[in-house]
Image: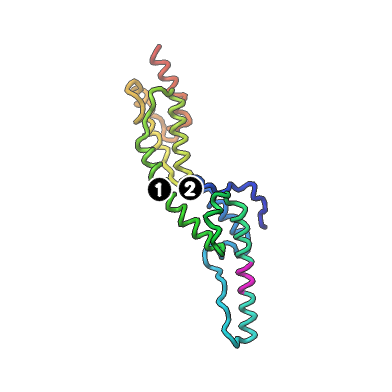
Amino acid sequence: MESNNFNLTEKLRGAENWVRWKWAVEGLLLEREGAWEVCVGELKKPEPLADGATETAKKKYEKALQSFDKGNRMARGVFARTLDTSITDLVTQCKTAKEIWDKLHDVFEQKNVQAQYATQMQFANFVRDEKDGMAHHIAKLDQLTAKMQDLEIRPTDFVVMCKLLETLPKDFEPLKQAWGTRPAKQQTLAGAAKTFDFGRAASRC
């Protein structure tokens, strides 16, 4: 059954939401007969018939053309409803849904790679601002890892916790050693803020 509730689909604004948009729109295209097939080139517009084609060939051609036209209209309708106006300007010269799909990939897949590189460098260079409390510091790291996941970069909990421990000052050394003795499943950001803030308060008493 086709879904017509486009209000639930985030409009494509740029590289920052390309991955989420692409995933959602692929689902919408697959729901519509021929739409996905047109976009990926599996369903193509048939070549015009030569003069003197048989009636059988003409009927086959008309059927193929109708299938393509239907899929193309369906796909273009999805794009019309899920692209921000700033993105629409990029594809106004495209004649078919496949041209639109290919154009968006050409633009945003490359930008996505650049964004992935920049975000991974941001993670590698992540440090603690001395003005930040521990809860704020951990929240920043959590936001950064969420951004990475949006870009299809999925660091493990172990990698994220190693980054957090790496950024803690020397007076957290006892807590860092104690944290390492916890079961691996418990070593997550969810419990780290409370643990490290409490530990710092206790160390000052």
What are the residue bounds of the magenta stretch? 64-69
- Residue located beneath label 2 in the image: 15
- Locate the C terminus and report the quarter of the image it occupies: top left
Horizontal relation, residue 83 to residue 112: left or right: right
Q: Which amino acid does label 1 sit on?
A: Gln
**Which residue occupies 63% across, 63% down?**
73
- Where residue 53 sits, quadrant-wise, is bottom right
Q: Of residues 121 and 97, which is closer to you in this image?
A: 97
> Which amino acid type corresponds to the residue marked 2 in the rendered image?
Ala
**Closer to the camera in the image, 16 or 190:** 16
Q: Which residue lies furthest to the top in this view?
A: 205
Which of disc 1 and disc 2 is earlier in sequence? 2
Q: How far apart are marks 2 and 1 (CA)?
A: 9 Å
Counting every numbered tag in the picture gives 2
Residue 133, position in %: x, y? 43, 22
Q: Is residue 65 magenta?
A: yes
Please give the name of the residue rendered at 38% of the width and 42% of the height, measured from the top-left corner.
Answer: 120
Q: Secondary structure beneath disc 2?
A: helix
Label 1 environment density (alpha carbons within 10 Å; few <14, some 14–19, many ≥20) = few
Q: Which residue lies furthest to the left in this view?
A: 170
Estimate how packed mark 2 is, as few (under 14), some (14 to 19) or many (20 or more) residues with alpha carbons within 10 Å. Answer: some
Q: Mark 1 points at which residue?
A: 114
- Majority secondary structure in the magenta region: helix
Where is residue 35 shown, x and y percent of the image?
59, 62
Residue at horizontal 40 percent and vertical 48 percent from the top? 114
Tell me which residue sits at (61%, 83%) in the image.
57
